[in-house]
């Protein structure tokens, strides 16, 4: 029977569907075909936490998210930025198709307040995506809370962390390591459900690397704050 099936599948007239593994929901397309190809669900996992590990800020990590954020901004939910290192630069986001009316900026004090804000945004159900910058070392229990919050709120959580945390355990559904070169962005899949280890070069918009953030004093009138 197995040989008969294999022979049948070799027929060029028969097309095979690309199914995600059982238990894995379709994701939100990253906008990069090469990356979608290796991710379970063919995109950013929804209802899960994604860790993006970088050597330093501003190497193109936000360019990697722009296609997905543009699509997410078409929903009637927020795209939350929790304690970003700088204020997002509106014109750069608009140029990438992001609706600024869907952007929610949350400024929290470093430490427990930021962690609390991220957890609340993920679990609220009102945020399609949550971007957060947590430089402090988080233990597995804290990360597990964020993963469970993303599942509860069906939000796509993006956690930017220093690359020296690469060897620490993490319950995140997806972990990516990224580096920049003169030819593009090198993305390595460090962990994902089903498979990992893939490395690819992506052509991102380097013009967005610096302009995506404005100085901290700008854009305050567009800032919305979550307090507790």
Image: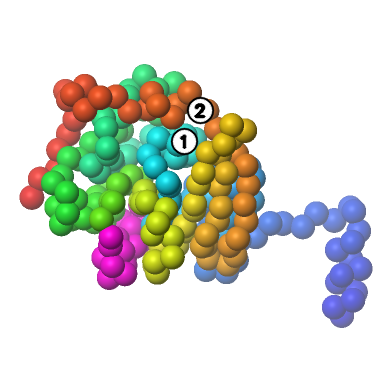
Give the residue at mark 1: 60
Q: Do the residues labelled 2 and 1 touch (CB within 8 Å)?
A: yes
- The crowd level at tag 2 (other Cα within 10 Å; few <14, some 14-19, many 20+) is some
Residue 27: % across, % down: 51, 52
Residue name at image x 28 percent, y 62 percent: 138
Circle 1 crowding by C-alpha within 10 Å: few under 14, some 14–19, many from 20: many
Secondary structure, mark 1, is loop
For the question of whether residue 71 can be seen, the reply is no
Q: Is residue 105 magenta?
A: no
Residue positioned most to the left: 228
Picture quarter with the N terminus: bottom right
Q: Looking at the image, which residue is at 21% across and 55% down?
A: 115
Which segment is the magenta one?
137-157
Q: Which of the 4 image quadrants contains residue 47?
A: bottom left
Residue 173 lies, in percent from the top left, at 45, 62
Residue for point 33% across, 28% down: 213
- Kindly identify which numbered label has been placed on residue 206: 2
Q: What element carries label 2?
A: helix
């Amino acid at each position: 029977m197995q040989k008969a099936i294999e022979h049948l599948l070799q027929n060029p007239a028969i097309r095979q569907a690309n199914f995600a593994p059982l238990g894995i929901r379709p994701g939100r397309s990253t906008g990069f075909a090469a990356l979608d190809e290796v991710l379970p669900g063919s995109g950013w996992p929804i209802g899960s936490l994604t860790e993006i590990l970088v050597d330093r800020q501003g190497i193109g990590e936000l360019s990697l998210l722009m296609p997905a954020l543009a699509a997410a901004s078409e929903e009637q939910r927020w795209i939350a930025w929790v304690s970003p290192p700088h204020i997002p630069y509106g014109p750069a986001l608009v140029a990438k198709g992001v609706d600024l009316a869907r952007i929610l900026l949350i400024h929290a004090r470093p430490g427990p307040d930021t962690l609390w804000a991220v957890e609340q945004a993920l679990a609220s159900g009102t945020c399609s995506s949550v971007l957060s910058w947590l430089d402090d070392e988080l233990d597995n229990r804290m990360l597990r809370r964020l993963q469970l919050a993303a599942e509860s709120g069906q939000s796509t959580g993006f956690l930017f962390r220093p690359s020296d945390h690469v060897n620490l355990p993490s319950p995140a559904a997806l972990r990516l390591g990224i580096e920049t070169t003169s030819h593009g962005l090198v993305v390595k899949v460090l962990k994902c459900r089903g498979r990992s280890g893939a490395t690819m070069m992506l052509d991102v918009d380097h013009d967005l690397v610096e302009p995506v953030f404005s100085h901290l004093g700008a854009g305050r009138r567009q800032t919305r704050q979550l307090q507790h």
